Image (spheres, rainbow, N blue to C red):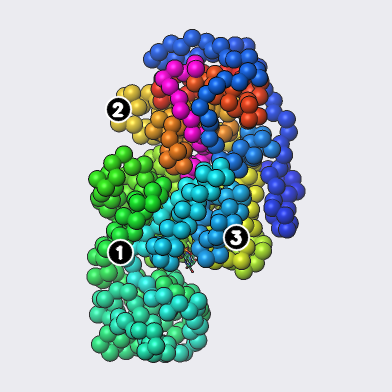
Amino acid sequence: MSRSFRCSISLSPLHSNEFPRIPVTKPRIHVPVPKPMTVALSKVVSPLRVAAPGVMIEAAGLEVDRVTEAELKENGFRSTRKTKIVCTIGPRTCEFEEIEALAVGGMNVARVNMCHGTREWHRDVIRRVRQLNEEKGFAVAVMMDTEGSEIHMDDLNDVESTKAEDGQIWTFTVRAFDQPSRPERTITVNYDGFAEDVKVGDELLVDGGMVTFVVIEKIGPDVICRCTDPGLLLPRANLTFWRNGSLVRERNAMLPTISSKDWLDIDFGIEEGVDFIAVSFVKSAEVIKTLKSYIIDRSPGSQIGIIAKIESIDSLKNLEEIIQVSDGTMVARGDLGAQIPLEQVPLIQHEVIQLCRQLNKPVIVASQLLESMIEYPIPTRAEVADVSEAVGQQADALMLSSESAMGQYPEKALAVLRSVSLRIEKCRREEKHWDVTDLRIVSSSKLDEISEEICNTTSRMANKLKADAIFVYTKTGQTASLLSRNRPDCPIFAFAPSTSIQRCLNLKWGLIPFRLDFSDDMESNLNRTFSLLKARAMIKSGDLIIVVSDVMQSIQAIKVP
Ligand SMILES: Nc1ncnc2c1ncn2[C@@H]1O[C@H](COP(=O)(O)OP(=O)(O)OP(=O)(O)O)[C@@H](O)[C@H]1O
Ligand SMILES: CC(=O)C(=O)O
Ligand SMILES: [K+]
Ligand SMILES: [Mg+2]
């Protein structure tokens, strides 16, 4: 399954103290196109007459993320990063300036994890992201990640961590304590059935094996354990128990995917207008459907995208169904690795990425991408290889967890994701890896199927003609998504009428989302877009653009006048 890359080597050090810069590409070569060309399927459009260069057309504005705009100008279209980046916001990155630094560094989506912190804390973070977008011209989307109801330890009464030594006796209990009365070496577990479900002799794994205990005695609500693999216990660490080498799933398998606390968090997310809700420990498609109808009911017309987190054994059994009904998927390798043998995690990652591409859903690869950078300013070689693999597999997005939430070098970790993405994407383009992947038809109607074929053809055409960009005018984001699915060489400029669609498109591979009011008159849309983009030096005369829209089923190849 692993892929090898043949690529030219250029030296832009990962471990310089500076932000790794995006390598500057050679001047672009244009394939001359004699005159605007239209391949219209359902409706013939007249060839374009575009306003003379430099003529400003009075029109409503065009909004694009400030950082993307700068990258486009600085490095040229083709070297613009295609792989998107999600950063978890935590104590290390929650201030306005810290979030801004991440946005400047290329964060496309800010994630808040409802496992940690209070709603007030999350509200402040979400509002700061929004404020930054409004005041400073970013288009960072917000993702709220639910806690889910798997078994975990309590928050250790706000202690940052505590060490369990080899052979020490610890008590895991379902009793709750007030801070002062909490006995030493005692951990409260969130799941009431815990003491009944475990048996003497079971192995208790904290965080998938970062610390291991063996159960030696049960006394009412208390489970007495001996530490067999010492290590640090972190607040709210996940707990799994194993019997004869298998994960034990007793009644806890019946815990609801969305707990009562999660529902309150979801209400909070809807109120705060988050762009994505990531659902932890999804077991089946049903829960995603239920959540979607709940959101439509609570907030009609809502654009909130539901991301299914693949992190439990049950989700693997219903993978295709789950991906099908979700708006995106996350390979949550942290908890997944605590539930299945670790050597299977890379295989699952590969499978989920492929399946998501087939089903036209974005996929995020998450957890431990740059774990060592929590403490060190440079990554390990193995981490760089892991990130390269995910980029080479053409995942839509990579995610930072602790690295950005509580690590010492959040901006450096982000810079590493950025530079590795750019380098590997460049290799793929140089390999002329034009995708031979046979994409299945995802549309359910003939009309949609036509759009789908148009998008497939557009991408192939853009690769062969070495187009500078694909423009897509999309009211729902669907056509843009179908183009992204093809992973074309050039960037896809997606023009969407609302800020919320613009932000949601931020998660998809290769899409550069713009907010733009457009009409059903494609000729005037194009005239306006060309002049607005030229005025901002984002395109220039002679650039070859392939244009599609969900307004009209046609493909046009146009040289910017
Ligand atoms: N809002 C927050 N407040 C305090 N600490 C946080 C916050 N968000 C994240 N963290 C810290 O960063 C670490 C990594 O974050 P991450 O979102 O990956 O959580 P996690 O506990 O590993 O759970 P999950 O499986 O949901 O990702 C957490 O374990 C926690 O220590
Ligand atoms: C991201 C997450 O939830 C995990 O890796 O477990
Ligand atoms: K979570
Ligand atoms: Mg998880």
The residue sitting at the right extreme is 11
- C-beta proximity under 8 Å, tags 2 and 3: no
Q: Is residue 59 above or below residue 187?
A: above
Q: Amino acid at mark 2?
A: Ser
Mark 2, residues whose alpha carbon is within 10 Å: few (<14), some, or many (≥20)?
A: few
List the residue tagged with mark 2. Answer: 445
Q: Amino acid at mark 1?
A: Lys
Residue 382 is at least partly visible in this image: no
For the residue labelled by badge 3, is the local secondary structure a helix, a strand or a loop? helix
> Which numbered marker is on residue 479?
none
Residue 454 in the image: x percent, y percent? 44, 24
Residue 518 within the magenta-colored segment of the rendering: yes
Residue 33 in the image: x percent, y percent? 62, 15
Q: Which quadrant of the figure has residue 257?
A: bottom left
Q: Nearer the viewer, residue 435 or 408?
A: 408
Residue 296 in the image: x percent, y percent? 27, 44
List the residue tagged with mark 1. Answer: 261
Q: Residue at x 45, y 32 (%)?
A: 496
Residue 476 in the image: x percent, y percent? 39, 33
User: Magenta span covers which residues?
Assistant: 505-524
Q: Earlier in the sequence, mark 1 or mark 3?
A: 1
Q: Nearer the viewer, residue 449 or 1?
A: 449
Q: Nearer the viewer, residue 48 or 191?
A: 48
Q: Nearer the viewer, residue 200 or 506?
A: 506
List the residue tagged with mark 3. Answer: 410
